[in-house]
Amino acid sequence: MKKIMTRNKNQNHGVPKTHPRYLSLKFRHKIIDGMKNLVVAEAGLIAHGRGECFDYIIGEKTTKTARKAIKAAVAALLIAKKPVISVNGNAAALVPEDLVKLSKLLKIPLEINIFYFKEGRIKAIKNILEKAGATDIKGTNENKMIELEGLESNRRKVDYIAKADVVMVPLEDGDRTEALKKLNKKVIAIDLNPVSRTALWADITIVDNITRAIPEMIECAMELQRLDKGELVEILNKFDNISNIKATLDLIINYIENQKEEAFKILKK
Ligand code: ATP
């Protein structure tokens, strides 16, 4: 008789790599493990589900409009004087290594910023980022934090973000994006929902899954870091966020139309 192995608490969920939804399930389990380890808030599971839903209707791939936004975002981060990448629990649970890689490549600090405060959460997120190789992590010292005006949630407490000129906010809530905009920060959002308040308030909206967007940004940064400032400014000036969001919505409409056709073929059988 085969011996049944007891599962490690955080790994080996038994999803075979051949499973058609392997990647989606893999990241789902990262979020679940993150919740068990305090990195992800309970509500983070629901936010992930909302993201999955939008991912479905963009075809679970990095679209050409997302690629355009990624290029503009990397150019903006390279030009910026004091850029920072804000990291919440979901982002840290899903792509810690990639966030660290991007932060090191662009020489940008990571700042932990969470909506739901719980004793030990900041430490848990710090640990996961350090384990992934992070050396420059802001937002870990309560005494150094200042409060953003016009915000009541825990996200009002910021460290380096207060001084930053460009803030990248993966998986942000609309209130803080609005608050950051009112403080004249340039905001880069990664959000699967193209019509969330964050997506609409941001200067550069990357409608993509963070799990694909950050690796794409790393690739793009390796190319763009060879350019001079004038060329980067040109890339940024050519980018129009409003038309890019409109084009993203058109892509979604087309994708759904195609899915309708495909579904019909199956239904008719
Ligand atoms: P807003 O306040 O900006 O209108 P919201 O209230 O929907 O947005 P949250 O509930 O904080 O914001 O949800 C987080 C957002 O992150 C959602 O828009 C969701 O689509 C998005 N999201 C979730 N998971 C991912 C992911 N893996 N990659 C990119 N975006 C994601």
Image: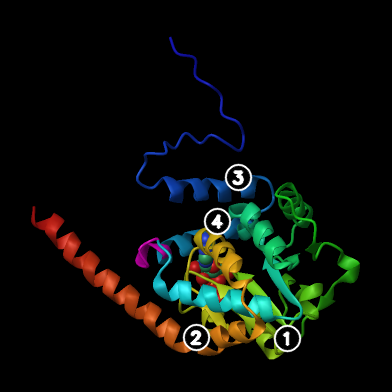
Q: Residue tagged by mark 1?
A: 150
| CA gap, disc 4 and disc 1 | 27 Å
**Residue 152's quadrant in the figure?**
bottom right
Dot 1 crowding, Cα within 10 Å, few <14, some 14–19, many 20+: few
Identify residue for label 3.
33
Q: Is residue 131 magenta?
A: no
Callout 3 secondary element: helix
Vertical position of residue 128 compared to residue 194: above or below: above
**Which residue shows up at 42% across the image and 45% down it?**
22
Q: Which tag, 4 or 1, sits closer to the chain's start?
A: 4
Spatial CA distance of label 4 from label 2 is: 29 Å
Q: Amino acid at mark 4?
A: Leu
Q: Earlier in the sequence, mark 4 or mark 3?
A: 3
Looking at the rendered structure, the kind of residue marked 3 is Asp
Q: Marks 4 and 3, Cα distance to the nearest angstrom?
A: 11 Å
134 displayed left or right of 89: right
Amino acid type at circle 2 is Asn
Residue at x 62% of width, y 56% of height: 98
Q: Earlier in the sequence, mark 3 or mark 1?
A: 3
Residue at label 4?
A: 45
Displayed quadrant of residue 77: bottom right
Residue 151, given in percent of the width and then of the height, sits at 72, 81
Dot placed on the residue nearer the N-terminal end, 2 or 1: 1
Query: Which residue type does callout 1 highlight?
Result: Gly
Whichever of labels 3 and 2 marks the residue nearer the N terminus, that label is 3
Asked if the residue under mark 1 is in contact with the one under mark 2, i.e. CB atoms within 8 Å, the reply is: no
In-front residue for pair 51/102: 102
N-terminal of the two: label 4 or label 2? Answer: 4
Residue 156 location, x and y as percent? 75, 76
Magenta residues, as a range? 55-60
